[in-house]
Amino acid sequence: MILRTFRMGVLARALEEILQVPPHAFGYPLLKPQGLSQEAREGLVKVCPSGAFFEEEGVFGLDLARCVGCGRCALGYPEAVGEMKTLEVAVTRREDLIQRVDLERGVFLDPGPPPPPRPELALPTLAFREVSAGDTGLTDSEIALLGNPFNDMGRFGFQVVASPRHGDALLVTGPVSRNMAKALERTYQAMPEPKGVVAVGNEAIAGGVFAESREVLGGVDKVLPVDVYVPGDPPRPGAILHGLLLLAGRVVQRLVGGVVR
């Protein structure tokens, strides 16, 4: 009976369910402009272990690409930080992962509309090659879960290929280490046009805890043109799936200026 249920695909979850953060898990942090007192701002900068919060010239900000999801900010300063219970966080512009609050007006700063996905990548099926450019293995494990019966990425037309010559997109995890930079470039060059690049995870976007290392060049966009950024440390499978859907132009970007619109 169990085998029959598996074959029928009953285990696969609806896309709406996949894109929701589980009730027991902490979602992505969301600043509350009205609660950002000086005391709260100073506390948030101190309590964050990854330096995701910053303040500069009348603006207080939060970089989701540096957040490790520990929840200390929301637990310690609930009046200043809430949470987003959605995994629709992939963006086509790095700037959209940063929340910026104008302290004088008490409102989020609007960075303007994001660039749309490239129309040439709006393919009925999309094959991708994954490259770990220096990842710890955590993000790679989350990508592997896209193929399980719960997420079942195949029903959306996504598949993994062994050779970049057969790929439409490149999923890159981890910061780009010096000894992987040339291999990453050669993999990208081997792909046929049109081709897209997805930076998966905070390390691939901003370097993560390895950002200051002499052996790391930085995020993927220091080496290759990036089409989609998927934050998380590591990102959940639903966030990665949303990134692929965004790359293929099947969903609209919802995170603009770090806030779900």
Image: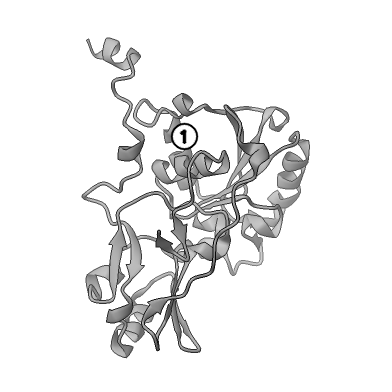
Percent of width and height locating residue 15: 36, 35
Along the viewing direction, whichever of 228 and 234 lies nearer the viewer: 228
Please tell me which residue is depicted at 31% across the width and 31% down the height of the picture.
13
User: Image check: 80 left or right of 230?
Assistant: left
Q: Which residue is mark 1?
A: 144
Percent of width and height locating residue 191: 74, 35
Is label 1 in a helix, a strand or a loop?
helix
Q: Residues within 10 Å of mark 1 (few under 14, many from 20)?
A: few
User: Measured along the vertical axis of the image, is residue 70 above or below residue 7?
Assistant: below
Residue 242 visible from this viewpoint: yes
Please tell me which residue is depicted at 58% across the width and 59% down the height of the picture.
93
User: Image check: 18 left or right of 243?
Assistant: left
Percent of width and height locating residue 219: 61, 59
User: Image check: 118 left or right of 100?
Assistant: right
User: Measured along the vertical axis of the image, is residue 114 above or below residue 123?
Assistant: below
User: Measured along the vertical axis of the image, is residue 74 above or below residue 118?
Assistant: below
Please tell me which residue is depicted at 21% across the width and 50% down the height of the picture.
24
Q: How many marks?
A: 1
Q: Quadrant of the N terminus?
A: top left
Location of residue 186 by image quarter: top right
Residue 206 visible from this viewpoint: no
Taking the view exactly as shown, the residue that stands out farthest to the front is: 113
Please tell me which residue is depicted at 70% across the width and 52% down the height of the picture.
224
Percent of width and height locating residue 40: 30, 83
User: Image check: 81 left or right of 99?
Assistant: left
